[in-house]
Image (tube, rainbow, N blue to C red):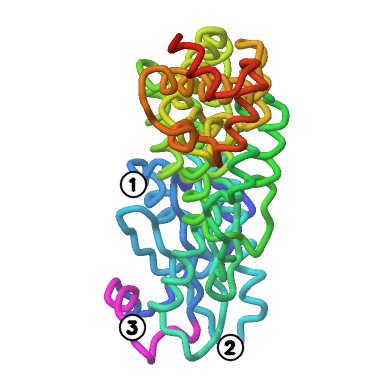
Amino acid sequence: MLQGRFKKTEEKQAPSAQIEVPSVSYSSLFVHQETLGANFRLMLMQLENSKKQPILLSFLQEYPFKNRPVVLPLSDMIVSVFSFDNQQPQPLKQLKHIGNRILTEWEEQFSEPMSLVLYDTNDPLLSLNEKYLHAKQALEIRFFKGYRQLSVIEDKVNWVMIDPFLTPSEQREWIDMLNEGDRDKIKQWMYKEFLNKADPYPEPGLLRTRLTSLLAQVRRFMKSFYLDEGMLERRYHQVFESILYNPILYRIVQELLLFLYEVLDRANNNQENARTDVIEQAIRYIEENFTNPKLRLEDVANQVNRSAAYFSSLLTKKQGSSFRQLLTKTRINEAQRLLIDTKLSIQDVADKTGFINANYFSKIFKEKTGTTPRSFRNRKKV
């Protein structure tokens, strides 16, 4: 018997007294009734594994309550409704004592994590249904506090509203951290952003959206290193599911960090090939867009999912020239071809090779070839 394992201090209490509250039912819990609710306090208990709820129900049915509540099992939690009359002093103190003892004794007997919420208010305007909805919402506090915790609520939870999406500067910061493989900085960022939250808490759904926004940056990084396949691709989808459905924020953060470390390890192993691929992609992009006079280093870096500073350094290392030198060389080579193979005017050649005007084109052309565009064309005709 479960009851035989309860502490002796509870066994010495007077026999459990059933307070008759015939009006408390599933109907009053789910349907607003203005006359019902003033003297009721709620205790909501939710197990991590809802399949073990019958064990919790048996535990509560045999628990030696001094004033037995009405116990209403639901599909994913158990609601206990306590009735206090005006002569009973400090009902909240009594409820906290009961809640803490239930948590302690449940932990002693069973390993299944449980979250427990006490809803305490004597607001005569609130129905039992409204109290239940407030208490049910408060169960989501476990997202921040974890299981094996007692939360006391006296009103509905007022979540803090936040912008869930990464700002442009945060996106750039994440691109840099990933490209640099800075694990300590990533971990510090994650811990500061998501852990050690205090009341008032941000709305859990918005934090989940923020985590998916962050995961999108990781996805871009994976694609740039051709890591979006096989085992890592499956792990990516597992982490995405965890962000959406895992009830505890700390677990999500830890799982995401472990996944990030796997991605960084694979990226490091493939780094040289990936770097070559990045430069090849960038060169192709420059060759396809050099006719745009507004083409910038930042445009090409964004195209290959790298920060401008990192891409510039990588380009110089691999090609021995800067972005500006490579772009100018591409434009001059095409200009030479047009001067020889076509009868286009100097202005038209300048326009078709991305120079802002003919004078600037002629100046740069002479610097790079030692002759003017007109002389170059005439010399090749001889």
User: Tag on residue 32?
Assistant: 3
Of 138 and 378, the residue lying toward us: 378
Secondary structure of the residue carrying numbered label 3:
loop
Task: Please check the rendered image and state whether residue 82 is part of the magenta-colored stretch, yes or no.
Answer: no
The magenta region covers 26-39
Label 2 Cα neighbours within 10 Å, binned few <14 / some 14-19 / many ≥20: few
Label 3 Cα neighbours within 10 Å, binned few <14 / some 14-19 / many ≥20: some
Separation of disc 2 and disc 3 at Cα?
Answer: 23 Å
Separation of disc 1 and disc 2 at Cα?
Answer: 34 Å
Q: Do the CB atoms of the residues marked 2 and 3 lie less than 8 Å apart?
A: no
Amino acid type, mark 3: His
The residue beneath circle 1 is 54
Q: How many marks?
A: 3
Q: Nearer the viewer, mark 2 or mark 3?
A: 3
The percent position of residue 90, horizontal first and vertical second, equals: 67, 77
User: In which quadrant is the N terminus drawn?
Assistant: top left
Tell me which secondary structure the magenta stretch mostly adopts. loop
User: In which quadrant is the C terminus drawn?
Assistant: top left
The residue beneath circle 2 is 86
Of 366 and 97, the residue lying toward us: 366
Of pointers 1 and 2, the one earlier in the residue sequence:
1
The percent position of residue 107, horizontal first and vertical second, equals: 56, 41
Q: Nearer the viewer, mark 1 or mark 3?
A: 3
Q: Note whether 153 is above or below 291 in the view shown.
A: below
Secondary structure of the residue carrying numbered label 2:
loop
Determine whether, in the image, residue 121 is placed left or right of residue 61.
right
**Res. 181 visible in picture:** no
